[in-house]
Every structure is written in C-alpha cells, then in structure tokens.
Amino acid sequence: MSETIKHKIEALSKEIEEHNYNYYVLSHPTISDFEFDKVLEELSDLEKKYPEYLSPDSPSQRVGGQITKEFKTVKHKYPMLSLGNTYNEDDLRDFDDRIRKAGLSDFEYVCELKYDGVSISLIYVNGLLTQAVTRGDGEKGDDVTANVKTIRSIPLKLRGKDFPDEFEIRGEIFLPKKEFIRINDELKSQLIEEGYGEEEIFEKQFKNPRNAASGTLKMQDSKVVASRRLDCYLYALLGKDLPFETHYEGLHEAEKWGFKVSADMEKCSSIDGLIKYLEKWDKKRHSLNVETDGVVIKINSFDQQKKLGFTAKSPRWAIAYKFKAAQVSTILESISYQVGRTGAITPVANLKPVQLAGTTVKRASLHNADIIEKLDVRLGDTVFVEKGGEIIPKIIAVDLSKRSSDLFSESSHPTIYITNCPECNTKLVRSEGEANHYCPNELGCPPQLKGKMEHFVSRKAMDIDSLGAETIAQLYDAGLVKTIADLYELKKEELLKIDRMAEKSANNLLEGIKISKAVPFERVLFALGIRHIGETTAKKLAYYFKNSDSLKNATLDQLLEVGDIGERTAQTIIDYFADRRSAEIISKLKHAGLQFELSEEQLTTTTEKLKDLTFVVSGVFNKFSRDEIKKTIEQNGGKNTGSISGKTSFVLAGENMGPEKLKKAEKLCVPVISEEDFIKMIAE
Ligand code: IVH
C-alpha cells in the first residue's frame, strides 16, 4: 500500500512539474487552471495524509508557507561580479580592440538582453535545487532558497540525466511588467480601503519592477512571494569541468534540464553584427513582458574567456551596452511645492505637455533643493526629460544652448528654493543629512492637519469609515475641525450645514465617531500620527508602558529599553508629549472617552502564541462568538483579516461558512481549521 502511495505522489509531482514547465518555461500551457488546481490539490491531500512522503522538491512547496525570520549570509564560491558599461558604438569598438590586443583574433560573441531585475545564484546538487543566494556585496549574499522555490520557472528537480553532479547557474529574477501593474493596482486598492491619501499611496507603491522584485525576494513570508509570480531567466553556468566548450552550448543544454533561457540570445561574429542586434532590440524590447536596460555581450568560448580573465571588478570577456532611456525636451513652465502629510516638501516641475514613450508628460519630479541646484534648472528653461524604468519622469539636464541671454528673462537668475511653507508660511527646516525640507508646523499646517486626520480615522487606526478624505477637507475648510480632538465635539446641526451632507450620513458619521471611543489603546496611540510610530511600534509602546501617562513621563533611556526603538524615534516621542498642543489634544480626547490605557483584559491575558499568524474567521461557532474568537486571536499576538489571500495563515471555519471562501482557501492552500483545532492551538 505505502509503495503505491509513494508512486502516486511521485507521479502527481512529475505531472505537475511538467505542466509548470510547459506553462512557465515554454509559455505553452497544456492544462486548464481548473484541472491544474485539481491535480495539485490531490497531491497536497496525499502529502498531508502521508507526510513521510513529502519531498522538499515537491511542487506543492511552490505555494510557499515557510517564514524566513532572518536570511542566512552565504559566501559565494565564485564572486558575483558586475559588468563594465558601454553607451555607444565607439565604446563597443574599444572593447573589441581590447580583446584583439589581448591576442585573440578568431572569436565569437554571444549577445543577450540585459534583464533589469535581481541577480541570483542557484546551486544544484544531484539534480536538486539546494540553495539560492542573492548577489549581496558580490562576495557574500543572502540565502533566499525558500522564496526562490516558489518561482515556477525555476526547476526544483532537473529534467533528464545529463547534468553535472554539482554546478551553479546564475540568472536574473524579475517581475513581469504585467505582474508589476497588477501588484501595484492591488496595493493601491488596499491602501485606499485603509484610508491612505493619494500622495502616501504613491510613496508606498513600487517605483519599478526591479524594486518590486528585490523587495519581494527579501520578504519573510514565502506565501506572499508565491502570490507575486516572479520569473527568472538564466544566463551563466559555473562549475568545475563543465561538459561543454562554449557559453552558448552550455545554456542550450541548461534549457534541456528545465531552465528558462532566453530565446533572444544570438551568436554574432562581427562588430557590425553586434550593432544590428542592439538596434533591433532598442526598439523591440518595449514589447517584451520584462524590463530590459541593455544588452550583454560575452565571448562565447570558455577557453578564450579564461585567457582574457578578470579585472578586480568585472570580467574582461564580457561587457554591457546600456540602452538610452526615452528622452525628450520641453519647457519648464513653473515649479510647485507640495506639502505632504508628514510635512515633507516636494518640488514638482510643471512642464509644457509633451509626448514621451507613449504618454503625455506634464510633470516631473525635482526631488529636492540639491537636485535643483545641481541641475541649475530655471523657469523658462528648455529641459531634457527622461523616462527610465520609473513611473514619474525626471529632468536630467538643461539645454543651455536654448537659455535666453536676455537679462530680463525668467531664466537669467537661478531658482531660489522656497524658504517658507507654501501652505502655512512657517519657516521650513532641513535637518543635517536630510535631503528634504520640512514644514515643522505639524499641528498648524493645513495639509498636515488634514493628513493627520485622514490617518486618525483610517482602518488600522480609529476605523471611522464614514469619514473619508473629502469630508475631512470639507469639515476642515468649514472651520468645524482643526485637530483630531474636534471630531468628538461635532454636532449634527453643524454637519447638516455642509454640502451634500444629509441626515443619514450625518447620523452615520456621528455613530462611527462614537463607536471609535472603544478602540483599544495601542490603536489610539498609532492613530495620533506621531512621526516614526507605525502600527507595530505603537503596539509595543502600549504594552510596555500600559498607559499614556507612563509613556508621557518616560525618559529617553526607558524608551530605548523597548525593543526596536532607536534614539530618533525615542526623541520624537519625547518631543511630541512635551508639545503643549499635543498635551491639549490628548486631554480633550481623554475627556471625550477614548482609551488611553490597556484594558483589564489586555493587561491580564496576553501571549505571543499566535505571533506572525494571520486568521480569517468565518461562519458560526458553538463555544464562542465570532467576536470572542477574534479578540482571542489578537490577545495571543495574531492578526485578523477579512479576506483570504496568500498572506493568510489559517482560515478558522465555523458552521455555514461560505463555499466561495472555502474554495479560495483550498486554491491558495491555506489550512482550514475548526473551532476545536483553534482551542487546542491556544491551550497548548
Ligand atoms: S552576465 C560576470 N548576462 O547585469 C557578470 N548579466 O552588471 C555576469 N544581468 O549583476 C553577468 N542580464 O544581474 C549577465 N544576460 C545577462 C544579464 C545580466 C542581466 C545583470 C546581472 C549582473 C548585471 C551586470
């Protein structure tokens, strides 16, 4: 019997990996998603029943689940070097000359696209993926094996038999362009739901697919990594006595072992051939689903590579050619200065609208005062705007030949950075070592006050969902609320005077505000919006000091005793409580009945049994109410969420749980547990 089960598990694993290979490597699906999920489910069920046959290279492992608390540092067997860069035909001819001067005359190049992602080194022993390490500093990198195993195009087990017993293969992990858009869109919807403003959402979104790929690869929860659908092209084989003579041949062999090797690689024997390849891909690359920033040119023969050797930083036998980013010139019409929720000032260039890489560009980021000074950009200037991998284009230089010599023109004098806040006229400050100017008038500057209120009412803070950014702006502009404390003094008659505010919405709003008075202390602390105090820090502080008075009286040393709180954060807390205006707000909020201390229950029964675990509680329960269960989860350090995602650790299912939820949990391989299982979990 057990032999049959073992064979069944092996056969299912093989079948699933074959489908993965067809889909992710060959881009040629041979099964429907539905059928695929069914086979995977069958395998997972068998593995759950017979865990003795669960192999580390089972395709069921690709859905993730392993949490990496800290990535282990690993020394590379062969250092991971970078490449020298070239930007034009002349540089390439110089490279070609250097090779000839080194004594080679009969040689071949291989041209490949330069993928813009994160480099990775994969180690295979006896056909199994044993370790995946990031580049790190080139000498040592991070062991990200658990996360890399979720990438479907990377074989966990090699195909065929002709691979060396031990070898290393390197490549580029990337996030396909479509995935990047999907993830950013999802993140945006989630942040909107959590009450974040437009500017914060922009700050929190990934700026380009490369950042997204490197951020994802370093996440602790491999389930989230699995949900992000990273991909990987392999472009270099390393090892002792590899059984081939050329790079090209090696990669084609690797393809047979199951690796994804780019079909766009080409052999080429002359500089003219190289140039043709560059010209072709400079245009064609935009239609690929992966970001590329150039071409890598390598000498094909391993023997000749060895002869050429390395400089301290890069191989002499390879070079990168960087594509020019799309560029255009236009006129700088004005500079506006935006004040963010935290008071950070961002200068923005308003440009004469111009077409660039398929979109109309009207604005470009100018980042900060140093950049403006360095570029010496002036009003009326003709500027070069470039759109690289980033969403917002940037100004890269001024076309000085177009600058007017007229002494009375706008561009005759350098741009003078603003000295006072454009919103409240307070003198701006710039701390040492910081690039940005700040408006220090945290408790008096309108966008900061509105921003603070938006944060205060957001879901993870006071969760007053009847109060959105627009209503806050209306309330503020009408002079009804100046600080968060004023929210608790709002009267229905006042609200009804506001545009588009009917009886029902006014009632809802007041009810939401009233309910928020029961929000626990740690969330109130987070809601106050003290700089550097995020959700986790607020929780730590709340549990450490237990009430706001002890926190207020804490010394710097006492604050530093709380885990993960550095001097900068500690000082911010001291400054916040020392400010007369914050003291006044807190006193009003206390008076209104908000929670400024841990509850009796919180004080008595807190454990960390469910730390880092996220639950979705659904259905009707026998022994406890749903709210009691949710509370117990939080009291034991766990988190509750409403919808099932790759991040969910468990679905706690009661009676009558919706079949859609159950299906989703199964699809994402999230374990579904009963009330009894949960009670056992807590009692253990
Ligand atoms: S070969 C010895 N080939 O570009 C260097 N690199 O600065 C071996 N990259 O860190 C690298 N596509 O992450 C090579 N087809 C390709 C590449 C490629 C992207 C990245 C790689 C490397 C960087 C070079």
Image (cartoon, rainbow, N blue to C red):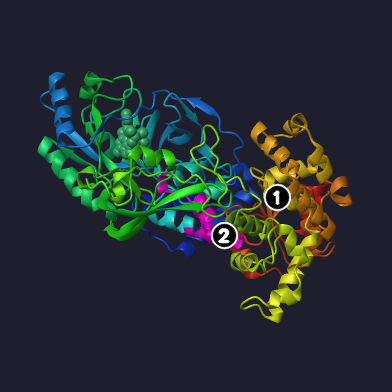
**Considering the numbered disc 2 on the image, is that residue within a helix, a strand or a loop?**
helix
Q: Is residue 506 left or right of residue 31?
A: right
Quote the CA–CA distance across marks 2 and 1.
19 Å
Q: Position of residue 423 (x, y in %)?
A: 54, 55
Mark 1 lies on residue: 526
Q: Position of residue 201 (x, y in %)?
A: 52, 55
> Depth-wise, is mark 2 or mark 1 nearer the camera?
1
Tell me: residue 379, above or below residue 240: below
- Residue at (17% x, 46% y) in the render: 279
**Considering the numbered disc 1 on the image, is that residue within a helix, a strand or a loop?**
helix
Q: Position of residue 647 (x, y in %)?
A: 60, 52
Q: Which of marks 1 and 2 precedes in the sequence?
A: 2
Say what amino acid the circle numbered 1 marks: Phe
Q: Is residue 290 left or right of residue 320?
A: right
What range of the chain is rendered magenta? 185-210
Viewer-closest of 662 and 404: 404
Mark 2 lies on residue: 190
Q: Residues within 10 Å of mark 1 (few under 14, many from 20)?
A: many
